[in-house]
Image: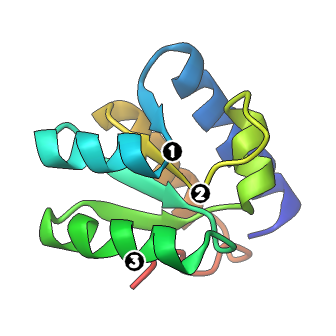
Amino acid sequence: MDATHQRRLLGLLGLGARGRLVVVGVDRVREAAHKGTLVLAVVAPDAAANSRDKLLPLLKARRVAVVEGPGAQALGEAMGKPQTAAVGVTDRQLAKGIRALLNEGPAAPPHAVR
């Protein structure tokens, strides 16, 4: 992900945080997935293996789209925290905007986390 796309993604997530359209942190993302309110999850590539192991199988089972975002520190700073491993989007329109951002332009490689 180039710097422009990363900045725009963090901006969208920051707006989502201010509008209460996202949940922050592995535990909150897991709770939203269990409730069925989670539309999209953004996971930091440098998230701890334990965090990824707790989160990714659940998201796959619940058929929640997962994208790899910026590092945990940048992701956390956009959310007003020192760092975070995951941010969950609960608003369909915001998730649609994030997907469109990640799919635009030739500089944007596929971001799906398997």
Residue 99 position within the rendered picture, expressed as x and y whole percent measured from the top left: 45, 55
Discs 3, 1 touching: Cβ within 8 Å: no
Cα–Cα gap, marks 3 and 2: 12 Å
Please identify the quadrant where the N terminus is shown: bottom right
The amino acid sitting under disc 3 is: Asp
Cα–Cα gap, marks 2 and 1: 6 Å
Name the residue at 39% across, 77% down.
53
Using the rendered view, name the quadrant where residue 79 is placed: top right
At mark 1, the secondary structure is loop
The residue lying toward the viewer, choosing from 35 and 19, is 35
| Left or right of 101, for residue 65 | left
The amino acid sitting under disc 2 is: Ala
At mark 2, the secondary structure is loop
Mark 3 or mark 1: whose residue is earlier in sequence: 1
Q: Which residue is mark 3?
A: 53
How many residues crowd mark 3 within 10 Å: few (<14), some (14–19), many (20+)? few
Discs 3, 2 touching: Cβ within 8 Å: no
Discs 2, 1 touching: Cβ within 8 Å: yes
How many residues crowd mark 1 within 10 Å: few (<14), some (14–19), many (20+)? some
| Left or right of 72, for residue 38 | left
Looking at the image, residue 112 lies above or below residue 89: below
At mark 3, the secondary structure is helix
How many residues crowd mark 2 within 10 Å: few (<14), some (14–19), many (20+)? many
Please identify the quadrant where the C terminus is shown: bottom left
For residue 25, the mark is 1
For residue 85, the mark is 2
Name the residue at 26% across, 76% down.
57
Residue 78 position within the rendered picture, expressed as x and y whole percent measured from the top left: 73, 35
Using the rendered view, name the quadrant where residue 62 is placed: bottom left
| Left or right of 64, for residue 112 | right
The residue lying toward the viewer, choosing from 103 and 25, is 25
